[in-house]
Amino acid sequence: MAGKRTFTMIKPDAVGAGNTGAIIKMIEEAGFRIIAMKKTHLSKERAGQFYEVHKERPFYNDLTSYMSSGAIIPMILEKDNAVEDFRKLIGATNPKEAAEGTIRALFAESIEANAIHGSDSDENAQIEGSFFFSATEQF
Ligand code: CMP
């Protein structure tokens, strides 16, 4: 059965450009309920932990520097088929390949500064949500 929850974070480029409100509006209008949300900041070390799976990739050092360069807004979201539907809403990792009307097509600057993250599986949604929020912070 498709899961009901996914994890997202609005990344430093989108927060810095003042696109937080527009992005949250699109998320709610697409039928996602916000279960947990905060504005916070990742140190380079914490960003490295979050993106541990990409440790061997050539872009890992740049990615963790970028992700610790400004405020981020992590959220846990709820909707039927949450992981798949959210990835459709945000579009492809590379904004040049993101479908028209998707969050990345509208707001991403580059493949690295791509406005928003979306979990790629139910298992990772659970792991990533727990990275930022305790059970008592989820409503
Ligand atoms: P996200 O889906 O949040 O998780 C991994 C991130 O790594 C991805 O978004 C991009 O921000 C970044 N990324 C993926 N591929 C590349 C790439 N080829 N060059 C630079 N950054 C990348």
Image: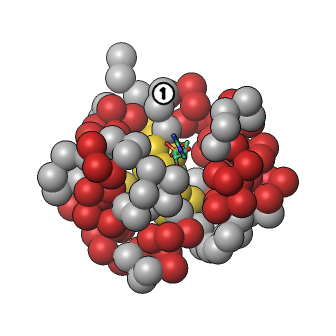
Q: Nearer the viewer, residue 20 or 104?
A: 104
Q: Quadrant of the N terminus?
A: top left
In this picture, residue 12 sits left or right of residue 25: right
The residue pinned by badge 1 equals 121
Percent coordinates x, y for residue 137 in the rendering: 64, 58
Mark 1: which amino acid?
Ser
Q: Give the number of marks.
A: 1
Q: Residue at x 84, y 54 (%)?
A: 45
Q: Residue at x 71, y 60 (%)?
A: 65
Q: How is the image coloured?
A: secondary structure
Per the image, label 1 sits on a secondary structure element best described as loop
Q: Is residue 38 visible?
A: no
Q: Is mark 1 within 8 Å of ligand 1?
A: no
> Is the residue marked by circle 1 packed among few (<14), some (14-19), or many (20+) residues within 10 Å?
some
In this picture, residue 130 sits left or right of residue 106: right
Percent coordinates x, y for residue 20 in the rendering: 41, 74
Specify the farthest residue to the left: 100
Residue 20 sits above or below residue 65 on the image:
below
Percent coordinates x, y for residue 75 in the rendering: 52, 57
Specify the farthest residue to the right: 45
Specify the farthest residue to the front: 58
Q: Residue at x 67, y 53 (%)?
A: 62
Q: Nearer the viewer, residue 44 or 62?
A: 62
Where on the picture, by quarter, is residue 50?
top right
Q: Nearer the viewer, residue 59 or 6?
A: 59
Percent coordinates x, y for residue 90 in the rendering: 32, 49
Q: Nearer the viewer, residue 55 or 134?
A: 55
Q: Residue at x 68, y 70 (%)?
A: 69
Residue 48 sits above or below residue 124 on the image:
below
Q: Is residue 53 visible?
A: yes
